Amino acid sequence: MNRSSHSFVLLGAVAVVIGCAVACAAEPQAGPDRPVVLQLQWQPQAQFAGYMVALDKGFFREAGLPNVELRWWLEGDQPFRRVMDGKADFCTGWLSQGLAERAQDRKIVNIAQIMQRSALMLVVRSDSGITRPEDMAGRRVGLWGGDFDVQPKAFFKKYGVEPEIVLQSSSVVPFLRSAVDVASAMYYNEYHKLIEAGLQRGELRTFFFSDHDMNFPEDGIYCTEATRRDRPSVCRALVSASIKGWAYALAHEREALDIVMRHCDQAKMPTNRNHQRWMLRAMGELIRHRVGNDPSCWGTLQQKDFDCVARVLREQKLIERIPPFSAFYRPVPAGGGGSP
């Protein structure tokens, strides 16, 4: 995930034919001469395996989108702003980010919530003496800043904890060298990097925010309200093909990892296959959480998760009002039309 650019920061084939015109002149026609751009919020890694597989296996094309471009994050990118500015048709992003955008009256809508469980967590050494949240009082805690701070701050408030906050980089070295007592981590990424660095799971104690009634599911698929209204077939095809890509990736791990590593190599993204395997399997857990193994059930945004995120954002004065759930979450039914 991006540590610097945040401002606040199935397996069934789908055949969809895209209409030759759109109702609104501001919405350009999708077709072979104009790619449908999906802006990802970070660089190539298995966090986005489903989209890479959907592209490489031709699932987007089969769904009626012959020219889909996956656009990777570059320094300074803000995926939601790219969508609002018309530089991308869709983006992936966190529920907390999307909700904050909507609360500022930016017409962003969630059309599929891919991850069902938050991967954000705090990690401590088992011998640190920290066995419960209250034990973090006065201890040095590494936080990334921006959107990554929302859950930790709510967590500390809930348990009446006042730790010493230090800015954490994307490196796990400060934790390995005991410069911090508590480190922020994503389950699919930094947690495994600590294991790759030589720590055993038994040497670590984890605090998942989702286990403390703060489930802020991360990656969802977003577009503008106008795109959802005027191009429902494109939205439906993009989501259906993406979910099919995820289902295929999780069922064909070796092939999916070949695809991921090829994209990583092309982008000169330093990584290794073992780490990407962990990430892919972790994403499978996060996608299937509560909804099970049937891909037709994937991509749903639970209102209780929306309500939880909205409440915490307002408590932290990051938003002034909570937008209606029905206006924010706008899935396109698999066989449905484009009612606003």
Image: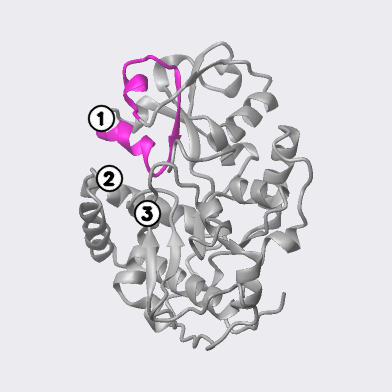
Asked if 78 appears above or below 86 in the picture, the reply is: above
Residue positioned 42% across, 72% down in the render: 244
Asked if 232 appears above or below 127 in the picture, the reply is: below
Expressed as whole percent of the image width and height from the top left, the position of residue 296 reads 53, 73
At label 1, the amino acid type is: Ala
Which part of the image, by quadrant, shows the C terminus?
A: bottom right
Visible residue check, residue 141: yes
Q: Is residue 327 left or right of residue 156?
A: right
Residue positioned 43% across, 34% down in the render: 185
At label 3, the amino acid type is: Trp
Q: Label 1: few (<14), some or many (≥20) within 10 Å?
A: few
Residue at the disc numbered 3: 72
> Between residues 219 and 263, which one lies in front from this camera angle?
263
Q: Does residue 32 show up magenta in the picture?
A: no
Q: Which residues are magenta?
A: 171-196
Residue at the disc numbered 2: 275
Residue at the disc numbered 1: 197
Tell me the CA gap for discs 1 and 2. Answer: 11 Å
